[in-house]
Amino acid sequence: MKKGLMLLVGFIMAAFMCVPTAWAQSADMIERSFTGTSEASTPQAARREIQEKAAQKISEDLIKELIGEERYTKNKTLIQNKIEKLSNRYIPFAKPSELLQEGTSYKMTVNVKVSLKDLKTLLQEQSLLSENDTVPLALPLITFTDRVDLKSFRWWKPEEGANKAFLISQNRHFENALRGAFQKYSFYLVKTSSLGLQIPRSYQNERLSLEDMQFLSHYFGAPVIIDGQVQYTKSAESSSRYRIDVKLTALQVSNGRPIADVSRKFETETGPFESSVDKKVRETVEATSQELASQVYEAWQRGSLGATVLRLTFRGKIPFNQKEAFKEKLKSQVREIHNIRERLVTADAEAYEVDTNLNARDFAAKLNHLNIDGRKWTPVSTSDSEILLQLQR
């Protein structure tokens, strides 16, 4: 670790000499300072030691703010070796003050700028930013509907499997493609063959409610559900061609929130129904599955899986040309925000949805001194799912 910090010292000294003014203007950058002492025998050694302490302490404090003290302690060795040793990747600028001698010791303050974006990227690479300690396990619940021969198949309704070999094979194609796509990100898909008989009869429903999905999620230990509809119909343009409509939605079961969504429509070539449909599915299912898996992975990297969804309503006008900057500055000041989405704009208020690992009351406490571009916002009411902020006059 000492070697990595020594490399950082050299880097930040060079950065201090040549860093552009733009660093100071980035909404992603935050400033931190550290005042330390050293008993080193020479001023040069003292300066180096204090700078090393600054990088280590500031890194530790910020990482704890982002992932929590419990997770930091649990992964301390990993963080020291894989994150803090690479602190030059997220601390591009440091400015040491004058070194003061106090008796036999030296004292100095170091001011640094930290890129939260780059620090979060490192945490994501080590799977430390997500709230889930385990890799997501997904359970496919895909309905296959054949409107040509008027048949349907759902693996969780065992009696529907009779005389439906074609739809069963389609289910297998989709599951194999999804499993392969998810495995590329080291995620796993529950294999549903022979599982239908395990489902309690009260949950063998054509249309699954959120409560049904939550039961199946807990039953199979899968925090993510892939709720899907695959439908086969005759083409409107030719009686010997067919259309395939695919709709796949990945749901975070704990709150029923969609985290990924893919919709596709395909036309087959001319030919018999089953063979032409099977050919087109084989040609397209891998790309469709890959897109869904990549979206789930991005949500997992952002820390959205397992996070609480809160609505922040700002009562007061935010100029249109400042909206994107406003969101970035909000994220930089409240580091517990994993992701933010604009949801509603009215004449006198704007609402955003945020993913966070905090409950509403603890999150509201983080907003008590919110100041963006000199405009101060104060929380005036808090519920379990929404925080209302008022612009101070």
Image: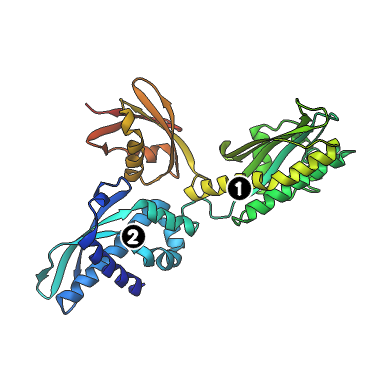
Q: Would residue 68 be seen by someone viewing this image from the given angle?
A: no
Q: Amino acid at mark 2?
A: Ser
Specify which label sits upstream in the sequence, 1 or 2: 2
**Rendered image: mark on residue 293:** 1
- From what the image shows, is residue 338 above or below residue 206? below
Q: Would residue 202 be seen by someone viewing this image from the given angle?
A: yes
- From what the image shows, is residue 59 above or below residue 258? below
- Label 1 CA crowd tier, 10 Å (few <14, some 14–19, many 20+): many
Q: What residue did someone put label 2 on?
A: 59
- Screen quadrant of the C terminus: top left
Q: Secondary structure at mark 2?
A: helix
Residue at 46% across / 62% down in the picture? 74
Residue sitting farthest toward the bottom: 41
Q: Secondary structure at mark 1?
A: helix
Residue at 25% across / 46% down in the picture? 25
Q: Position of residue 188 (x, y in %)?
A: 65, 53
Which image quadrant for residue 184? bottom right
- Screen quadrant of the N terminus: bottom left
